[in-house]
Amino acid sequence: MSKKSEVYLYGQILGTHSFLLKDGFLQPDKYSEIKEQYFLPGGETGTAATVLASLGVSVIMDGTWIGTAVAPMLKNFYSGKAVDLSLLHYVQDDPGVMDYVVIAGLVRSPMGRFQTLFSSGKRWWNIPEESDIAGCKAAAIDPFFGEETELAADICKKNNIPYVTIDSRHDSILHKNAAVNVVSKECTSAHYAGMAPEEILKLMQNETDGLTIITQGGGSMLYARKGEDIHYMSPFNVEVKSTLGAGDTFKAGCVYGLLHGMSDSELVRFASACSAIAISRFPLPLNPPTLTEVTELINNQ
């Protein structure tokens, strides 16, 4: 690199096949008409890179190995964008990691082979290197890659680089050292079944000096730091076209807030506005939120 990127992103980088249906979600034994379909960058890290670049932030991506079916699309899509692909590892004997998402408004269903991949016993992602991370101003780390995920977090901590993570449990190293942990409704349902959101947040805020945010889809967000009362914020009111990428866009908004020294309330509001714009359009990679759009939404609601 001739110039160090502002943000280091580590995690899932995919090729996503998305299908927007015309007349509601799939029904057994009934025909469904596809209104729009695309093959574009996806995954938590891929989507965050697209959004951050649209917001004017330079990023470098690291993580998932890239196969023969994904590589040409990825290189073409990010050509001319402030997204550095130099760390990506390309394989020649596999089409690469892809998922397939069927969408109809508020409802979506992702499909893939991730259970098979993770149970294979083989590593299909990069090992983070300190030389690639040191010098960046902020980072985002997906929680999926075990020891390598923790290594990325350790490198960030060693170099005083604040990072955002997602869906990390209260007792994880990733949560304890994060500047921001964004916890989704899917995560709380899976790991904290039967607990109220306030109970979960109290448990999590006591284990870190960072900011914990619990999102609830269309419901109010909860956020707090250690020793604080719980704060609430309602999401922005927009017409939903597709929820694909909403959480990844929220994560990207949190990274932007870290970079620009926003207060906790400003950061949550900014991330929420980014996510609101994301769900109002399809496909997100071709129509990511811009800084002007986010600012306008914040000022007008």
Image (cartoon, rainbow, N blue to C red):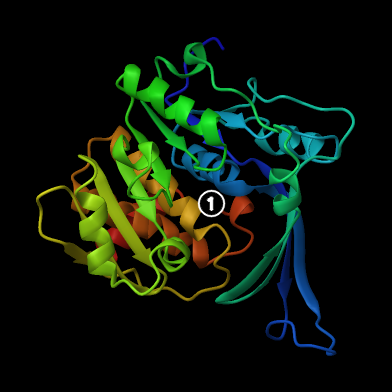
Disc 1, SS: loop
Depicted 188 relative to depicted 113: above or below: below
Q: Residues within 10 Å of mark 1 (few under 14, many from 20)?
A: many
Depicted 45 relative to depicted 238: above or below: above
Which quarter shows the C terminus?
Answer: bottom left
Which quarter shows the N terminus?
Answer: top right
List x then y, in percent, for residue 77. 70, 39
| Residue 37 shows in the view | yes
List x then y, in percent, for residue 47. 57, 47
Please identify the quarter of the rendering in which residue 235 is found.
Answer: bottom left
List x then y, in percent, for residue 21. 73, 76
User: Which residue is at 30% across, 39% downward?
Assistant: 176
> In this rendering, would 84 be left or right of 247?
right
Residue situated in front as seen by the camera: 55 or 141: 141
Task: Name the outermost residue toward the right.
Answer: 93
| Residue 179 shows in the view | no
Q: What is the total number of numbered labels drawn onto the structure image?
A: 1
User: Which residue is at 36% across, 59% downward?
Assistant: 273
> In this rendering, would 299 be left or right of 156?
left
Please identify the quarter of the rendering in which residue 188 is found.
Answer: bottom left
Residue situated in front as seen by the camera: 120 or 137: 120
Q: Amino acid at mark 1?
A: Pro
List x then y, in percent, for residue 201. 25, 59
> In this rendering, would 151 be left or right of 61?
left
Depicted 178 relative to depicted 285: above or below: above
User: Which residue is at 63% across, 52% downward?
Assistant: 286
> To which residue does mark 1 refer?
288
